[in-house]
Image (cartoon, rainbow, N blue to C red):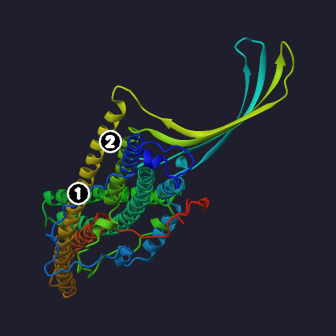
Amino acid sequence: MLQRRNNPDLPNMEAAPRRDRHPLASGLLALGLVVLAGCSVAPLPELKPPVPDAWRNAPAGVAPPSADLHGWWQALGDPELDGLIDRALQNNLDVAQAAERLRAARVLNRNAHDPYLPSLHGRTNDVIDPDTTASYFVVGFDALWELPLFGAWQSSKRLAQGQENGASAALRGAQVSMVAEVTRRWVELRSAQEQARLLTGIRDAQQEKLRLVQVREQLKLAPPVEVAKTQAELARTEAALAEPQQAINASAQQLAVLLGQPEPDPAWLTPGPQPRLGQWQLTTAPADMLRARPEIASAEAEVLRAAGELGMSRADIWPHIGLGASLQWSANILSNYRAHTGEAISSVGPVIDVPLFDWGQRISAAHAKDHELKAAVYGYRQAVLQGVAEAETAMGDLEQLRMREEATQRASEALDGSMAALRKRAELSLGSNLDVQDGLIENQRAQLELVSAIAARDLAYVSLYKALGGAPMPNPPSPATAPTAQGSTD
């Protein structure tokens, strides 16, 4: 040791003994390891959606490629519906609100790391000496750069990204609900108009039947009870007319709300053809439901947000370390003795905020956020289960209603043939006009059943694609784009 100190190759200063350097080096190394360990962020929980291997209610032999989530309503073959949905995407107020919230979330996400960038503050103050002999005017600048240690950098990004993803899923959900609701209300409107037309035809036929029965009663060819029975049937039909009229009014008004306008368009109240799915069948079962369904995307975003909050709460347990600097200039503005000229002073150095004792509040907050993250994961799994259940139910309903519509169609066609035969017999004086009216009433009742079957299948089709998250995918709203008066979603 003495020989080393006398070595002429060493600097011209006394070297410290090795035993004095080891504790300092070890301490710095330990501190560095702690900081590096604390800077890492906990991995995201693995999401394992409990999905079935195959759709239980899908038709036999159906392969699972992607679903058509663009313009699915066009299968109903109604150009007016296509135009309504285009207008609703531009003018719907729920969609406009969700678009603005997404813009807000994107703005915040872009600045998620700003709290960990250097900041500069300017301030002024007037200070009086404790001995009340002078007062000073102080102008200063303070700079602070808090280091994003202990996972704070990644956690803040997770938190902001989760909020943006949640807003994006909310916009997607608003679009899905709006498109499905416009389609549903349009189907109900046109179906109710067709039902009103058929019920009016039945009422007219029953009025004619009542006249014929009254004539037969006057001729003593029918008992009075037959007249009363026919009158009761006519009254029931007239009462039944109120139901489709109510549906027409309600559907038209709801369409106006969905399109962001106070009154329905007069053209909607003019009867038109009923939308019909026709020969469409479910030939593919979608495999990308987990990506398309807004509720599942929202639950996944909640997991990311909860993970960010957990990371931030864990980072708060450790010291906050940063670099600070200040520059202050003071001037004596009033003194009992003499005036002083302005003086300036500056400082720079580390800023360390060490939490020492808070009764365990920060640790409890971290534990609470850990439980909230687990709850978010359970919520994600629940959202997947709910999506699978709704899709399975809708697929099963759609297939059953397809068979119902086909059977009802065959019954209506058979009655059409029977009606033609009744008319022919009446022309040949082989049958009475009363039989023709009975046949007409029965035929139109069968058409009423067919209208109901078509509408039920159309609505099951809407429910299926809503369960699958099916809606158009317009360009996402840009934060820099100002919203239009109609609430455009860009």
Please report contact status of discs 1 and 2: CB closer than 8 Å, yes or no: no
Q: Which residue is mark 2?
A: 369
Q: CA distance from mark 1 to mark 2?
A: 25 Å
The one nearer the camera, 190 or 102, is: 102
On residue 66, the disc is none
Q: Is residue 146 above or below residue 468?
A: above
Residue at horizontal 19%, vertical 67%?
Answer: 397
The one nearer the camera, 15 or 52, is: 15
Whether residue 200 is visible to the viewer of this picture, yes or no, is no
* Residue 312 x, y percent position in the rendering: 40, 44
Q: Which quarter of the picture shows residue 284?
A: bottom left
Query: Viewed as shown, does residue 355 lie left or right of 135?
Result: left
Residue at horizontal 23%, vertical 68%?
Answer: 209
Query: Viewed as shown, does residue 290 lie left or right of 98?
Result: left
Q: Is residue 282 above or below residue 88?
A: below
Residue at horizontal 87%, vertical 17%?
Answer: 338
Question: Of the residues under marks 1 and 2, which one precedes in the sequence?
Answer: 2
* Residue 182 x, y percent position in the rendering: 41, 64
The one nearer the camera, 53 or 5, is: 5
Q: Which residue is mark 1?
A: 386
* Residue 20 x, y percent position in the rendering: 41, 40
Amino acid type of the residue that numbered disc 2 sits on in the rendered structure = Lys
**Quarter the C terminus occupies:** bottom right
Amino acid type of the residue that numbered disc 1 sits on in the rendered structure = Gln
* Residue 152 x, y percent position in the rendering: 43, 48
